[in-house]
């Protein structure tokens, strides 16, 4: 069988959860004798390729990369439905001629891909790795920072999210800059929705962005429900979230698999200072500031804090973290590391913290932590607590609450033997081969 995976970006330049997941499936399928390929893309604004279509290999798997700088978008609609992509997608699919297409992320390709696979009669499946199918910011985070259930009937909450993001990102002009304040974002969104309904929006840009945000859930919902033959949901929470937002695609809950050295933790010697760590994107929604805030309150030399991640992802946020940690002993920004060192890095960590403000959905770094017998403290959101047994492999804290995170850290560190005992009951046995077999079975 020939299977082609479509993913928004890929190795070697992009190497986070969705990319790793895609590579895992493709590698196993290939090892079983199937013909596989990956179609990826270069984000608009990243360094350009020489040609629209670039070809290379990753671990023996053919990769086709489409440069979105050469098919740029200028309005919101084109981030989820870009007709200009039809030609190149059809060309690529006719060349590859797959028996099955598996989409692990639609960003960059947009939902036009589903129209193309439908036209070419290619059975198409998906893995829902985040909330792209119904949420504008992919995070189910409302403009005021609260967690969101999905688009409201008027789509006013989606418009508010866009206005706030645009204003805080420095892209807004004129009165739209006021949306940097969440309360104003909601007020302005309601005004735009009402003005559109009354036919008062004469400004082409305002009418266009409002229409695009209102129509986004409808467009994706229609194409998902009419094209996808089946989908993988890696958590019960994500499966329910899609169902609650009118996605009727047959969904299969298949937990992600992890391939890593599962040897026991190295024995800690007398006087060992526990290492607390964060690994991931250093951005506001990941809540790294919450961890630093909580860590600062611990007694000196009670623990060490190591923060792994790219320091250039959000310059202003990184500057804020640097200021917060200035003069605080035992806080280190470690940068990134080769994925091959994952087991080595985790062997040095005694407690792993994921302080995310948003609905994380089975992050692979969480599963790596559990698989290496590293207990965790995570935000109390369903996409992570599904893997947590309190007091057995870790603890949860109230999302966004540095005080509660501090209390949990203090509780764990009060008794020296707690972390070593937790490491003995912390594990995660699912491998990528198990995951791949269950996924292949849905075709």
Image (cartoon, rainbow, N blue to C red):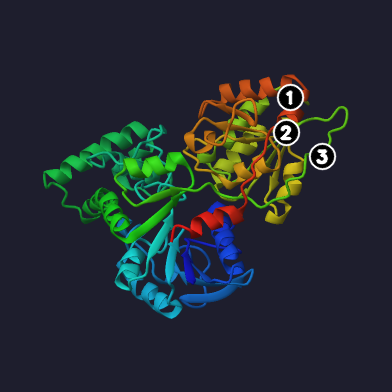
Q: How many marks?
A: 3
Quarter of the figure that contains the C terminus: bottom left
Query: What residue lies at 42% left-to-right and 62% top-to-bottom?
Result: 108
Q: Residue furthest bottom?
A: 95
Spatial CA distance of label 1 from label 3 is 15 Å
Residue 363 shown left or right of residue 250 in the figure: right
Snapshot quadrant of residue 394? top right
- Work out which residue is located at the far left of the displayed protein and give it: 198
Q: Which residue carries the number 1 mark?
A: 418
Residue at figure coordinates x 16%, y 49% from the top left: 201
Q: Secondary structure at mark 3?
A: loop
Labels 3 and 2 touching (C-beta < 8 A): no
SS state under label 1: helix
Judge the density around disc 1: few (<14), some (14-19), many (≥20) Cα neighbours within 10 Å: few
Q: Does any portion of residue 18 appear in the rendered image? A: yes
Q: Earlier in the sequence, mark 3 or mark 2?
A: 3
Q: Position of residue 24 (x, y in %)?
A: 59, 59
Where residue 137 sits: x, y (%)?
Answer: 40, 46
Q: Position of residue 99 (x, y in %)?
A: 43, 72
Q: Quadrant of residue 98?
A: bottom left
Report the residue marked by disc 2: 423
Residue that mark 3 sits on: 266
């Amino acid at each position: 069988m020939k299977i082609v995976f479509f993913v928004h970006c890929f190795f070697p330049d992009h190497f986070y959860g969705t990319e790793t997941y895609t590579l895992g499936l493709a590698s196993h399928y290939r090892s079983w004798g199937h013909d596989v390929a990956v179609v990826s893309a270069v984000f608009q604004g990243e360094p350009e390729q020489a040609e629209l279509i670039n070809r290379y290999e990753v671990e023996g798997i053919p990769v086709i990369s489409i440069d979105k700088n050469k098919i740029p978008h200028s309005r919101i609609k084109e981030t989820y439905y870009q007709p200009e992509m039809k030609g190149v997608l059809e060309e690529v699919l006719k060349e590859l001629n797959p028996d099955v297409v598996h989409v692990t992320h639609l960003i960059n390709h947009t939902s036009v891909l589903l129209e193309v696979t439908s036209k070419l009669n290619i059975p198409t499946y998906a893995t829902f790795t985040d909330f792209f199918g119904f949420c504008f910011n992919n995070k189910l985070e409302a403009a005021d920072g609260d967690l969101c259930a999905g688009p409201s009937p008027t789509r006013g909450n989606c418009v508010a999210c866009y206005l706030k993001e645009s204003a805080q990102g420095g892209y807004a002009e004129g009165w739209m800059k006021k949306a940097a304040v969440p309360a104003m974002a909601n007020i302005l969104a309601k005004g735009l929705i009402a003005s559109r309904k009354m036919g008062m929006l004469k400004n082409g840009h305002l009418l266009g962005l409002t229409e695009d945000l209102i129509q986004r859930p409808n467009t994706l919902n229609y194409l998902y429900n009419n094209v996808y033959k089946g989908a993988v949901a890696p958590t019960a929470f994500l499966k329910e979230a899609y169902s609650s937002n009118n996605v009727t695609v047959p969904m299969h809950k298949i937990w992600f698999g992890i391939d890593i050295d599962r040897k026991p933790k190295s024995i800690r010697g007398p006087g060992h200072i526990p290492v607390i760590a964060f690994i991931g994107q250093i951005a506001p929604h990941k809540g790294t500031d919450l961890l630093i805030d909580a860590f600062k309150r611990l007694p000196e030399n009670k623990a060490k804090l190591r923060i792994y991640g790219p320091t250039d992802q959000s310059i202003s946020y990184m500057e804020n973290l640097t200021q917060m940690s200035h003069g605080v002993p035992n806080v280190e920004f470690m940068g990134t590391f080769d994925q091959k060192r994952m087991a080595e890095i985790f062997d040095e960590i005694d407690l792993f913290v994921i302080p995310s403000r948003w609905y994380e959905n089975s992050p692979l770094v969480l599963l790596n932590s559990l698989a290496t017998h590293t207990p965790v403290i995570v935000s109390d959101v369903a996409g992570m607590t599904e893997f947590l047994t309190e007091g057995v492999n870790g603890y949860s804290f109230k999302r966004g609450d540095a005080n509660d995170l501090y209390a949990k850290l203090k509780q764990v560190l009060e008794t020296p033997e707690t972390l070593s005992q937790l490491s003995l009951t912390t594990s995660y046995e699912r491998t990528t081969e198990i995951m791949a077999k269950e996924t292949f079975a849905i075709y």
